[in-house]
Image (cartoon, rainbow, N blue to C red):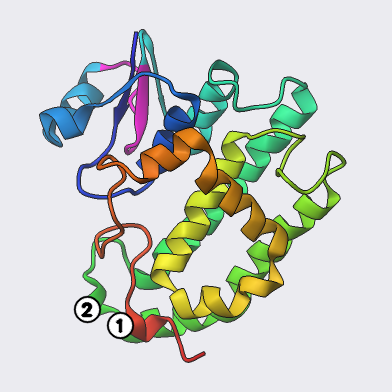
Amino acid sequence: MAYELYYWTGIQGRGEFIRLALEAAGAPYRDVAREEGDGVIARVSGEVATPSFAPPFLRDGEVVVGQVAAILLYLGDRLDLAPKAPQQKLWTHQIQLTIADFVLEGHDVHHPIGAGEYYENQKPESQRRAREFRDERVPKFLDWFEGILTRNPEGPAYLVGNRLSYADLSLFQVMDGLTYAFPKLMNSLDERYPKARALCLAVAEHPKVSAYLASERRLPGNEHDLFRHYPELDGRR
């Protein structure tokens, strides 16, 4: 039975973290809203006993699970994208939760006052938020990822152990989003994080991921997504 992914049409968004895992594993799935329209999300949410607060959510038979980190925790064993050892499995989940924090901070650069307000109504606040994000927060997060790659007992090729996990796929997605939104910033930081850069290149070259990235299923970045390119927020570098 194919997994059913429920997420908004027209953007990569948080649903992309789930798509990358499903695609990398070659798992059968339906991107349901892309087939039936966004209205199906509210309809299914209203039918199930364990609704997600917001998409994405995944349905696997009788199981319905929301929140990116929880979905990937559920899929990790099933898709062979998580370590078997309990301690490493928990560590992978911890990394994913940190990625969720990073994604939220990236989103809040262009919506620092409120998610329901237009960007145009909070530009001054966005520029202030962007300055701290560029100068302080991005390096702090990337220092951490570079550090755990360096300290991985199995070598720096992966975040956990010696094989691909969903955390690696998710770090690739964040780095790709940051490169779209902040090209000047990411270009200036490129040489500072060689291990993270090498990991992202390896993910992009993974045969199934590469095929997905080249397909029509991989939507391009746009200014309705989590990571948005507003040149005035990228600074001068």
Give the residue at x 28% y 37%: 7
Residue closest to the eye, 227 or 212: 212
Residue 158 appears at what percent x and percent y?
71, 43
| Residue at mark 2 | 120
Tell me which segment is drawn in magenta.
Answer: 48-59
Q: Is residue 49 left or right of residue 20?
A: left
Residue 2 % position (x, y) = 33, 14
Residue 136 lies in quadrant: bottom right
**Residue at 23% of width from left, 78% of height from top?**
121
The residues bearing labels 2 and 1 have C-alpha atoms spaced at a distance of 6 Å
Residue at 34% across, 82% down: 231
Q: Is residue 100 visible?
A: no
Q: Report crowding for label 2: few under 14, some 14 to 19, many 20 or more residues within 10 A (C-alpha).
A: few
The residue at which mark 1 appears reads as: 123
- Where disc 2 sits, the SS reads helix
**Label 1 SS:** helix
Q: Nearer the viewer, residue 142 or 122?
A: 142
